[in-house]
Image (cartoon, helix red, strand yellow):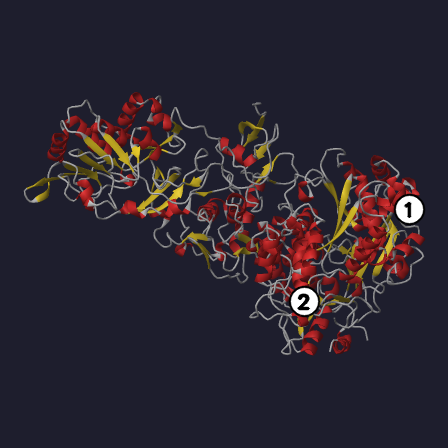
C-alpha cells in the first residue's frame, strides 16, 4: 500500500498489505494473518526444494543488483562441513529508499520469517539482520519480533519443532552507508571498519567469519514466504512486461510529489501512471523535471525517459537508468539540478570508506567542483573535468560507491547541461514555474 | 611434494609461465615488467586499495588490479595500453590533488614512488583548483614521524603492524577523504620492529627521526651488507654519505629476514663511524708505542709469536676469513670470545626471525672455527702466553688480567685501555670498512661488503692476518678475501663446497647447518 | 528519558549520564552490563564481532565514547585501543566528544534537500541558540548536526532527537518540538 496513504486500487499488495496495522506487528497478530505458515511448510521441505521454488519464481534481489535469489542460494554447497550464515541486509541507506524501513516497522515478523526460511534453505543455523543504526524504530520492532519468536519456539535450537536450529540475531550498525555493500556489511558485522572486500572470494565461498554466506535484502527475504505459500507460478505470473522480472516490487517515492510513500506494484507497471496516478503527480503549479528511479546511485532520468519507462529491471535500463533499490526521487522544476547533484555528490563523499584512491579523492573533488559551480564560481572546463573524473571513478574500484557518485554527475551533466552552463555564465537558477502562492 | 601446475600467459607481449595462483603483478616481474603499485607489498597481505596496478586483461570487462588478480591460462595482459596508462594517470592525479608537493623539503624525495611514477606516467599539471586538506604531522613514537599530508593511505604500515608485528598499534582513522593513519593516544610505536613501517611507506608520510634531514637520497652511496648487530644476520643496505654511515635498511632475503630488520639493529650503526681509531701500525720502543711501517710491525708481530704459545681474544664481529686466519696464527694455542647479550625480540609474522639474544654477527662462525664462547674472556690466557687481542675492545677488563701475558699484540680498530701496554698494534678496518663473510645462528654464511673507506693506513683484517702468517713463514698469499674463503672452504668441512660466487648476496648454509624451516612466502593473514 | 514525542520510543537522556572529560572514567562493563555483553558474545563465533554492540553500550551509558571507553572495550574483546579507535572513527553515530542533552540530527541529503531540509536546519540552529552546526548550545542542551540520508525520504524532513525518530519536520514545527524537550 502507498503507506502512509491508503492503498491505491492499482497496487498489488503482497508485502505491504498490513502496513499501518498495529496488531500485525505482534506475533499473535501476525499469526492471525497467516504468519509463519510458510516457515512451517518450509521446514517440512528439503532445502534444495525450497531453493528450486524460489529459483522457479523468478525472484531477484531487491537490494539493487537484481541477482536471481534462488541461484544465489544454490551457490551454498550443502554438507561442506562448514557453518553457513545468512545475512539480512537491513542497512537501507540509499538516498530515496525507505521500503525496508516500513517492512521492518510494520511487519517485523515477515522479515523474521523470511530470514528463517532463507537460513534453512541455505543450510545456515544463524541469520544476522544488520540494521542501520539510525533505524531505531525498525530495530525496536525487529528485536521485539525476534524475542517473541524465540519465546514461541519459532526460533532457537528446535525451530517450530522441526529439530532444526535457527537463530536470528539483530545487529545494529553505527552510521555508514557503505555497510549496505554486502562485503562491507560482513566486515562491519565482524567488528571492523566497513571496508568492502576484494572479490573473489565471493561470500558464498568466504563470507562473514570466513564462512560460506548468503546475503539478501529485507524485501527479498520477506518475499520468500508468500512464494512458498502460493507457489512459484503464482509469483511468476505477476509480471506486466519482461518475464525476467517477476512478482511485486516495493517502490519508495519521495521528493516533489503529492503522495510520497511506499508503493507495491507488479513488475512492469507503467512508470508514468505510477508517478501521476498512484503518487498523485507534481505539487500544485509545478511540473516534474527529472526522476532518479532507483536510489541515488542510478542515472537521472529526464521526464521523457521516465514517462516511457516500464517499472522492472529491464524497463529502467531501457529508460536510461536502473531499477536499483526502488527508491524513486522525484524532482520538480523548482529545483536547481546543480544543487541536487552537488548534494548527492556530498553524500557519496561523506560515505566513501576511503580505501580506493579514485573514490576517496574523486568523490570529494567532484563535490568541491560542483559546489563551486553551484555558487557561481565554475568554469566551462570544470564540466570536462567532472566528466573525466567521473570516468576515472567508474569501474576501477573495489566496490561501486565510486561509480555511484559518478553516475548522477555524468548523467546530470549530459542531460541537464544547460543548467550547469547557465550558472557558469553567471545566470542564477530561476524555477520555470513561479513559486506557488 | 606435488609440483604446482604452471599457467601460461602473455604479459606485454612476453610469454610467461608461472605457478598457478600467482598474481599478475608477480608474474609480470618474472617477465621483467614492473607494474606500478603502492599498496601491494610481497611481505604483506593484499589490500588492493591503491588501484595503481590496474592492467588491461584482454576479454575482461574491466581493468584488473594485478596485485589481486591471479593468472589464468592464455591471459593476455597489457600494462602499457592506453586504457591502463589512462587509469594510472588518473590515480596519480588523484593521489596528488591534496598532496603538498613539498618534495624539496621531503626526506623521501629521490626514493619516492609517488615521485617516480608521476615522472614516469603522470600528468604534467593538475586540474585541481580547490583548497588542499591539511593535517599536522604527528610523532608516532619510536623512530617514526607521520606526515599525513603526504600519505596516500596505502595501509602498508597498518598491515605490517597488524599482520606481521601482531601489534595493531596503527589504524586508519576517519573515512573518505578525511581518512588518515592514526594511533591511540599514549600508545606509541614501541614495537621492536616498528620502524619497518618507514621502509614500507612508499612515500614521504612515515619518516625516520634518526634519518630526518640527514641526507638527500641521491647523495647516498649504498652497499649490500649484513647487519652485524645480532646473530640473525639480517641482510641490509648500508647507506653512507661522505664516508659516514647514516642509515641501515633491510635488504630482502626470504631465507633470513624476509623484508624486515629490527629497530635495534637498524639504529645501532654509529659504532661503525667510530672516531678514536688507531690509524698507523705501531711498535713499542724506548719511548712507548711509536708509528712504524706495516712491514716492520708485521715482522715484529711474527717475531713475538715465534715459538710462543698464543692466546687469541677475538671479537665475534670478525669475519669467518679473519677468524680462520687467526686459528692459523694461534696454531696450537687457544682462542676465546665473548658476546654481549640482550632480550630476544621476535617478529611474530615471520618464521624464525628475531632480534637475537647474542648481539654480534659471527658467533656461529667463531664457534665453528674453534673459538670458545666464554664470559671470562681472558680465563684461558696462560702465564707467559702471547695475547693477541683481535677486534676486542676489552671493555670492563682490568689491565691486571692482561699482565699474565708475556706480550700483547693488538689487531684492532682502536687501542683498548686494558691493552695500553701492548707492544705491537696492527690497525684494522671495522665491519663497515672491509669485506668478508659471517655465519648466522642457523649456519647461513653470508657476504658483507665494504661500505666505507677505512682511515689512515688501516688495512682489512684478513689482509693483515694473511701478511702476518706469511711473515711467520706459513704458505699464505692472499690478494682477495675470496681467496681466504676458498682456503677456509678447503680446510674446514663445514664450509666445504662454498665459494663467494656460490654465496652470492643471499648466502648459503654451511654443510652441517641446523635444519631451518623455509620462510617462503610469508604466512600472514589470508588475502 | 526524553518525553514521548510522537508516540514512538523513549530514548536515553544522554545528559544525565554525561561525564565531562576531566572526570575519572567509570568502567561500563560491570554487573548487568557485563552480563549484557556476555550474552552478546554468545551470538557470534568471534569476540570481535561484539565490538559495535559493545560501543553502543558505552555510548548509552556515558553519552559518548571516550578514549577510556575504547580502551575498556578493547581490553574486553582482546583488541588494541588503536584498532578500536579506527573502528569508532569510521562510524558516524559514535560521539567522540560529549554532545548536548538533545542531539538533533537533521537529514539534508538531496531527497530531503529538495523538500526544504535546509530551512529546517536553519530553524533548529536559530531556536536552539546553537548558531552553528556541531556546536552545543550555551546551556548544554542542544547540539544540531546535518546528517546524511536517514532513510525516511518520504517523510521529509526526518529528524532524530537522540534515539527518537521524528518524521515530516517543517521549520514552523521546530519551536513546538523544542518546547516539548524543555
On the rendered image, what quadrant is the N terminus of chain A found in?
bottom right
> Who's the residue at 43% across and 35% down the image?
B256
For this orientation, the residue located farthest to the left is: B286
> Who's the residue at 89% across and 48% down the image?
A36
Can you tell which quarter of the image residue A430 is in?
A: bottom right
Q: Position of residue A58 (x, y in %)?
A: 84, 41
User: Closer to the observer: label 1 or label 2?
Assistant: 1
The answer to whether residue B446 is above or below residue A322 is above
Q: Secondary structure at mark 1?
A: helix
On the rendered image, what quadrant is the C terminus of chain A found in?
bottom right
Is residue B517 shown left or right of residue B427? right
Q: Position of residue A204 (x, y in %)?
A: 72, 39
Q: Are marks 1 and 2 on the same chain?
A: no
- Looking at the rendered structure, which numbered label has been put on residue C146? 2
Task: Give the crowd class for mark 1: few <14, some 14-19, many >=20 residues within 10 Å.
Answer: some
The answer to whether residue A382 is above or below residue B445 is below
Q: Visible in this render: residue B184?
A: yes
> Who's the residue at 51% across and 41% down the image?
B349
The answer to whether residue A257 is above or below residue B497 is below
Is residue B379 shown left or right of residue A185? left
Task: Look at mark 1 in the image and give the residue it sits on.
Answer: A37
User: Pointers 1 and 2 in contact (CB under 8 A)?
Assistant: no
Task: Give the crowd class for mark 2: few <14, some 14-19, many >=20 residues within 10 Å.
Answer: some
Q: Position of residue B232 (x, y in %)?
A: 40, 37
Front residue of A258 and B363: B363
Which of the chains bears the disc numbered 1? A
Amino acid at each position: 500500500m502507498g503507506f502512509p496513504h491508503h492503498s491505491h486500487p492499482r497496487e498489488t499488495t503482497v508485502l505491504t498489505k498490513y502496513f499501518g496495522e498495529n496488531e500485525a506487528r505482534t506475533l499473535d497478530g501476525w499469526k492471525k494473518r497467516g504468519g509463519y505458515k510458510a516457515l512451517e511448510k518450509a521446514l517440512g521441505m528439503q532445502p534444495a526444494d525450497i531453493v528450486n521454488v524460489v529459483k522457479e519464481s523468478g525472484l531477484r534481489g531487491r537490494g539493487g543488483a537484481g541477482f536471481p535469489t534462488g541461484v544465489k542460494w544454490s551457490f551454498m554447497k550443502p554438507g561442506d562441513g562448514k557453518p553457513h550464515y545468512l545475512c539480512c541486509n537491513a542497512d537501507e541507506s540509499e538516498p530515496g529508499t525507505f521500503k525496508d524501513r516500513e517492512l521492518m516497522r510494520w511487519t517485523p515478523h515477515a522479515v523474521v520469517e523470511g530470514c528463517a526460511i532463507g537460513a534453512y534453505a541455505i543450510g545456515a543455523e544463524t541469520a544476522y539482520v544488520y540494521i542501520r543504526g539510525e533505524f531505531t524504530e525498525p530495530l525496536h520492532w525487529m528485536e521485539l519480533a525476534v524475542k517473541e519468536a524465540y519465546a514461541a519456539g519459532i526460533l532457537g535450537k528446535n525451530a517450530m519443532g522441526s529439530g532444526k536450529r535457527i537463530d536470528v540475531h539483530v545487529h545494529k550498525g553505527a552510521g555508514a552507508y557503505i555497510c549496505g555493500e554486502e562485503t562491507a556489511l560482513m566486515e562491519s558485522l565482524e567488528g571492523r571498519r566497513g571496508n568492502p572486500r576484494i572479490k573473489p572470494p565471493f561470500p558464498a565461498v568466504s563470507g562473514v567469519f570466513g564462512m560460506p554466506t548468503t546475503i539478501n535484502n529485507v524485501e527479498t527475504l520477506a518475499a520468500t514466504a508468500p512464494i512458498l505459500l502460493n507457489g512459484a507460478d503464482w509469483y511468476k505470473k505477476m509480471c506486466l512486461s519482461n518475464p525476467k522480472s517477476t512478482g511485486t516490487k516495493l517502490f519508495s517515492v519521495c521528493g516533489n510529489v503529492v503522495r510520497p510513500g511506499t508503493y507495491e506494484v507488479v513488475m512492469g507497471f507503467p512508470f508514468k501512471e505510477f508517478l501521476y496516478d498512484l503518487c498523485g503527480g507534481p505539487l500544485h503549479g509545478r511540473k516534474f523535471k527529472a526522476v532518479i528511479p532507483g536510489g541515488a546511485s542510478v542515472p537521472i532520468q529526464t521526464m521523457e525517459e521516465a514517462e516511457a519507462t516500464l517499472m522492472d529491471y529491464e524497463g529502467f535500463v531501457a529508460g536510461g537508468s536502473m531499477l536499483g533499490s526502488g527508491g524513486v526521487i522525484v524532482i520538480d522544476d523548482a529545483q536547481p539540478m546543480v544543487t541536487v547533484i552537488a548534494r548527492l555528490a556530498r553524500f557519496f563523499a561523506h560515505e566513501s570508506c576511503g580505501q580506493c584512491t579514485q573514490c576517496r579523492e574523486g568523490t570529494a573533488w567532484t563535490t568541491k567542483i560542483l559546489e563551486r559551480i553551484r555558487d557561481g564560481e565554475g568554469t566551462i572546463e570544470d564540466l570536462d573535468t567532472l566528466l573525466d573524473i567521473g570516468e576515472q571513478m567508474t569501474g576501477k574500484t573495489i566496490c561501486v560507491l565510486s561509480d555511484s557518485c559518478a553516475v548522477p554527475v555524468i548523467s546530470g551533466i549530459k542531460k541537464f547541461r544547460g543548467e550547469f552552463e547557465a550558472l557558469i555564465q553567471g545566470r542564477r537558477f530561476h524555477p520555470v514555474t513561479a513559486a506557488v502562492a | 611434494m606435488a609440483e604446482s601446475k604452471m599457467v601460461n600467459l602473455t604479459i606485454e607481449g612476453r610469454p610467461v609461465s608461472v605457478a598457478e595462483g600467482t598474481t599478475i603483478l608477480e608474474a609480470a616481474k618474472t617477465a621483467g615488467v614492473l607494474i606500478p603499485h603502492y599498496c601491494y607489498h610481497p611481505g604483506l597481505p593484499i589490500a588492493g586499495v591503491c588501484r595503481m596496478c590496474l592492467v588491461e586483461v584482454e576479454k575482461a570487462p574491466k581493468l584488473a588490479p594485478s596485485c589481486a588478480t591471479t593468472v589464468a591460462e592464455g591471459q593476455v595482459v597489457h600494462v602499457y595500453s592506453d586504457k591502463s596508462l589512462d587509469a594510472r594517470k588518473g590515480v596519480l592525479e588523484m593521489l596528488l590533488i591534496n598532496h603538498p608537493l613539498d618534495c624539496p623539503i621531503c626526506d623521501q624525495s629521490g626514493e619516492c614512488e609517488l615521485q617516480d611514477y608521476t615522472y614516469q606516467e603522470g600528468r604534467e599539471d593538475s586540474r585541481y583548483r580547490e583548497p588542499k586538506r591539511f593535517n599536522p604531522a604527528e610523532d608516532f613514537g619510536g623512530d617514526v614521524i607521520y606526515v599525513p599530508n603526504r600519505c596516500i593511505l596505502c595501509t602498508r604500515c597498518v598491515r605490517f603492524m597488524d599482520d606481521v608485528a601482531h601489534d595493531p598499534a596503527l589504524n586508519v582513522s576517519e573515512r573518505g577523504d578525511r581518512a588518515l593513519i592514526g594511533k591511540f593516544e599514549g600508545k606509541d610505536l614501541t614495537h621492536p620492529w616498528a620502524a619497518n613501517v618507514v621502509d614500507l611507506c612508499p612515500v614521504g608520510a612515515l619518516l625516520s627521526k634518526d634519518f630526518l634531514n640527514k641526507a638527500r637520497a641521491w647523495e647516498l652511496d649504498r652497499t649490500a651488507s649484513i647487519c652485524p648487530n645480532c646473530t640473525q644476520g639480517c641482510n641490509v643496505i648500508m647507506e653512507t654519505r661522505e664516508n659516514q654511515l647514516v642509515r641501515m635498511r633491510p635488504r630482502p632475503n626470504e631465507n633470513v629476514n624476509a623484508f624486515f630488520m629490527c629497530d635495534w639493529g637498524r639504529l645501532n650503526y654509529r659504532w661503525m663511524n667510530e672516531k678514536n681509531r688507531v690509524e698507523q701500525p705501531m711498535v713499542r720502543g724506548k719511548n712507548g708505542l711509536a708509528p712504524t711501517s706495516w712491514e716492520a710491525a708485521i715482522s715484529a708481530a711474527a717475531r713475538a709469536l715465534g715459538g710462543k704459545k698464543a692466546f687469541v681474544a677475538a671479537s665475534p664481529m670478525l669475519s669467518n676469513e679473519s677468524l680462520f686466519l687467526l686459528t692459523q696464527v694461534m696454531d696450537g694455542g687457544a682462542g676465546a670470545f665473548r658476546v654481549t647479550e640482550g632480550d630476544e625480540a621476535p617478529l611474530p609474522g615471520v618464521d624464525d626471525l628475531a632480534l637475537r639474544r647474542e648481539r654480534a654477527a659471527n658467533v656461529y662462525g667463531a664457534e665453528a672455527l674453534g673459538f670458545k664462547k666464554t664470559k671470562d674472556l681472558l680465563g684461558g690466557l696462560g702465564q707467559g702466553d702471547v695475547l693477541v687481542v683481535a677486534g676486542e675492545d676489552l671493555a670492563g677488563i682490568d689491565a691486571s688480567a692482561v699482565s699474565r701475558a708475556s706480550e700483547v699484540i693488538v689487531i684492532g680498530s682502536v687501542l683498548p685501555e686494558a691493552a695500553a701496554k701492548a707492544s705491537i698494534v696492527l690497525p684494522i678496518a671495522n665491519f663497515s670498512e672491509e669485506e668478508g663473510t659471517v655465519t648466522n645462528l642457523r649456519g647461513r654464511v653470508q657476504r658483507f661488503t665494504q661500505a666505507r673507506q677505512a682511515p689512515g693506513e688501516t688495512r682489512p683484517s684478513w689482509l693483515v692476518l694473511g701478511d702476518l702468517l706469511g711473515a711467520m713463514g706459513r704458505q699464505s698469499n692472499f690478494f682477495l678475501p675470496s681467496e681466504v674463503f676458498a682456503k677456509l672452504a678447503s680446510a674446514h668441512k663445514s664450509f666445504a663446497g662454498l665459494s663467494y660466487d656460490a654465496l652470492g648476496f643471499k648466502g648459503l648454509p654451511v654443510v652441517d647447518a641446523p635444519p631451518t624451516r623455509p620462510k617462503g612466502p610469508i604466512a600472514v593473514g589470508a588475502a | 528519558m526524553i518525553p514521548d514525542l510522537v508516540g514512538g520510543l523513549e530514548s536515553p537522556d544522554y545528559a544525565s549520564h554525561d561525564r565531562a572529560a576531566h572526570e575519572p572514567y567509570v568502567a561500563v562493563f560491570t554487573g548487568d552490563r557485563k552480563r549484557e555483553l556476555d550474552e552478546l558474545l554468545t551470538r557470534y563465533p568471534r569476540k570481535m564481532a561484539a565490538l559495535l554492540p559493545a560501543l553502543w553500550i558505552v555510548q548509552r551509558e556515558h553519552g559518548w565514547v571516550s578514549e577510556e571507553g575504547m580502551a575498556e572495550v578493547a581490553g574486553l574483546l582482546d583488541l588494541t585501543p588503536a584498532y578500536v579507535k579506527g573502528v569508532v572513527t569510521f562510524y558516524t553515530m559514535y560521539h567522540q566528544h560529549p554532545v548536548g542533552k538533545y542531539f538533533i540530527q537533521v537529514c539534508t541529503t538531496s531527497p530531503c534537500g529538495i523538500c526544504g531540509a535546509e530551512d529546517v536546519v536553519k530553524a533548529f540552529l536559530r531556536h536552539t541558540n546553537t548558531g552553528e552546526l556541531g556546536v552545543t548550545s550555551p546551556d548544554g542542551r542542544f547540539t544540531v548536526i546535518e546528517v546524511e540520508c536517514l532513510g525516511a525520504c518520504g517523510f521529509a524532513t526526518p529528524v532524530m532527537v537522540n534515539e527518537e525518530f521524528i518524521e515530516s519536520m517543517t521549520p514552523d514545527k521546530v519551536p513546538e518540538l523544542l518546547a516539548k524537550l524543555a
